[in-house]
Amino acid sequence: MKNWITEKHQKESLAALKRLIDIPSVNTADGTSFPPFGKAIEECLTEALTICEELGMTTYHDPAGFYGYADYGQGEELIAVLCHLDVVPAGDLALWETDPFQAVVKEGVMYGRGSQDDKGPTIAALYAFKAVVDSGVAFNKRIRFVFGTDEETLWRCMAHYNLKEEQPTKGFVPDSAFPVTYAEKGLLQAKLIGPGSTAFALACGDAFNVVPGNAQYQGQDAQLVSQKLAELGISQTLTDQTVTVNGKAVHSSAAGQGVNAVNQLATGLVQVHSHPMLQFLAEKVGTETNGFSIFGEVKDEMTGELTFNVATINVTETKSEIELDLRIPVSYPAADLVPLLEKAAAAYGLTYEEFDHVPALYVPKESDLVQTLTTIYQNKTGDQTQPITSGGATYARTMKNMVAFGAHFPDTKSLAHQANEGISITEMVQAMDIYAEAIFQLCCN
Ligand SMILES: [Zn+2]
């Protein structure tokens, strides 16, 4: 297989990536007015489409601001590459060694929020396309890059796209890992709501899809809370009247590899303040990340075990609320699990409210698409890793015949949603080369 990527493509792609990272495209609005997810996301969408125009594509910017796309080539069939431009918040700035929204290259790594998820892979796919165009081969199919703006929250962008726009024949999503992800767990995000408290207040956690890496408690009895936590062996610091529990933030889909600071805080705090929400967390969740005490064992051969993440907790005088993120094995319908969760919550006087549900993805391993992409990856890298399944949710499940394809390599540490997110330039260029071959085989053969 040919090596597609020149030094010029490398240089230009890094400059383009910096243009996207430097726009802090964190969702700051609720989707009901223009721009639907805030000015920065709108600006980032405009910038991405400008880059596409510079690469010779024709672009469309949804006037309502939910999505945009860029087209090239001709023919009946439409091959799609689905990307997203929104990013999760930076989190604790003290943990970052650089400004998360000022891309910096240090020792061969470009750092910045979105460098891995998903601006880096997006740019890799775009400059892969450019490399194929530059090689002079003709496109006998059309290619479309679709840019979503709401991936880290509710995927309203793709819902709008699917209502109004052409469906692709097939394609890939550069928002996961190599080789190819052909099955993704179902995703359920929900809230449990209970009574407030006049004795204490809490506001911990960032987003549904992040395991909270720290959780703070403030109050006059902080010392006592700290002591209870210490007795349980929970890592924490006490300053004045604030206890900070130190967990480990990871993506919700990898909940088992993180340490959930909210659950840990709850197990200590409940010994000082009796409250149904804390009791629920201490008794039904604790250190479990597979929901076993609520659902029993939920596990299949294809996609593994259920993951259960308590992403946030908020307790005010009038209300308490936790946000949950569940990744459900493909052979379990969410509809079977929800009643069990409702029942477990009801036992503590908590009510269940669904926030988002995205069904699982499944494209057969034997399909042409999975086989073609896997073969390209294997030939390019020499790595014989077989197609995989994942707990992560990508846009692949929003359309037919789409799979997730890169851009993480199996041995790369995922820093998505974490502090000091960075992409190795060598790996980005390698991904670019793999994407170029994929675009060539899908669009020019
Ligand atoms: Zn992503």
Image (tube, grey):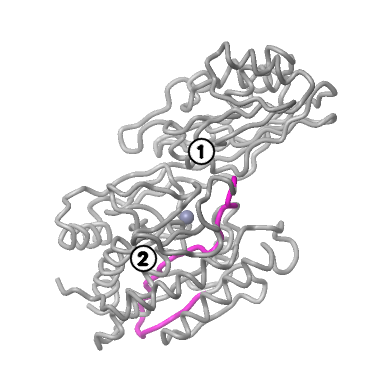
Residue kind at label 1, given as amino acid type: Ala
Residue position for label 2: 171
Residue 260 image point, x, y percent: 54, 30
Question: Gap between marks 2 and 1, in whole Å?
Answer: 32 Å
Dot 2 or dot 1, earlier in sequence: 2
Q: Give the residue type that dot 2 points to.
A: Gly
- Dividing the image into 4 quarters, which one contains the N terminus? bottom left
Image-quadrant location for residue 35: bottom right
Can you identify the residue that label 1 sits on?
249
Question: Residue 40's x, y, as percent?
Answer: 64, 67
Q: Find residue 400 and report its horizontal and vertical position in percent.
A: 41, 60
Q: Residue at x 38, y 53 (%)?
A: 176
Residue nearest the observer in this picture, 85 or 69: 85
- Residue range of the region highlighted in magenta in the rendering: 69-92
Is 71 placed left or right of 408 in the picture?
A: right
Crowding at dot 1, Cα within 10 Å, few <14 / some 14-19 / many 20+, comes out as many
